[in-house]
Image (cartoon, rainbow, N blue to C red):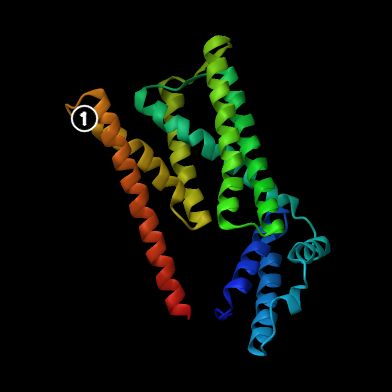
Amino acid sequence: MGQLQLSEKSKKFIDDLKLYLFSNGKNEQEIKEITEELEVHLYEAELNGKSVDRIIGPSPKEYMQSISSEMKTDYKAWVKYIPLIIMSAFSFSVFVDLLQGTLSYSLLKIIGTFVYSIIFFIGIIVAFRYVVRNQVSRVKEFIILLLPVLISTLFIGGVIVADSIYKTPIVNFGKLGSGIIGLFLVCFVIAFSIWARNAILPVTLIALYLPTMVSSLTSYNQETQLIVGMLMTYLLIGIYLFYVFKREKKKSKMTS
């Protein structure tokens, strides 16, 4: 179906509905079908001079809940995101550790990373649900979505501190094990990018670790290397975001 020209209010409601249904574990194909059908209704209503409220009623929250209650929860599709989140969390620490040598982790750190991933996953889902159900402002939306990031970051920080105080058994993977894990995670990052149809995970990994590798090869002192590395990280992420923005802008012009 071609892109329909909807008002900004209708577009935002469709986006919020998609996010709400997704965060409630509904089937992606069913979400697509329902939102496309709703787009048609909203488009026809706006052509006839009717407002969005005539279709969805005075309470967007109740409308979303009514649609969600009529759909079955797709537990199989939802569960697949949990290992993706856990693997993504591990990939960030593993890649930087591989640059320093073989992999070696305490049992506390391994368990802590698993728990951190689950806390982050649940926190993001809860934040998404709250944002789309309550139609908050962009500033409040940003703050709410930032909360699970801060909470999970504080948790993993606590795990690192606890790991330095309390000694637990060390799991040493050796050169062969480290190489296999590194290769597996590279394949995971590539597969994840293809599945998600964006390069945010590999770009973030490259932006975080490539500058550190490059700056370490220079003759600058440690403080200068850190500053140069940070600037390169922000530059790489900025270039990627600019590219995504230009690409989406081009797509919207083509569909208009």
* Residue 181 can be seen, yes or no: no
Identity of the residue drawn at 35% across and 36% down: 209
Identity of the residue drawn at 56% across and 50% down: 142
Q: Residue 72 lies in what quarter of the image?
A: bottom right
In this image, 233 relative to 113: left or right?
Answer: left
Q: In x, y percent, where is residue 184?
A: 47, 37
Q: In x, y percent, where is residue 224?
A: 24, 29
User: What residue type is disc 1 on?
Assistant: Leu
Mark 1 is surrounded, within 10 Å at the Cα level, by few (under 14), some (14 to 19) or many (20 or more) other residues, namely few
Which residue is at the far bottom?
48
Identify the image quadrant of the N terminus: bottom right
According to the picture, the residue beneath numbered tag 1 turns out to be 217
Identity of the residue drawn at 58% across and 10% down: 166
Q: Secondary structure at mark 1?
A: loop
Q: In x, y percent, where is residue 107?
A: 59, 18
Which residue is at the far left?
219
Identity of the residue drawn at 53% across and 36% down: 89
- Please count the marks in the image: 1
Q: In x, y percent, where is residue 92?
A: 46, 35
* Residue 57 can be seen, yes or no: yes
Compared to residue 188, the image places residue 2 above or below, namely: below
Compared to residue 201, the image places residue 152 above or below, namely: above
Q: Residue 147 lies in what quarter of the image?
A: top right
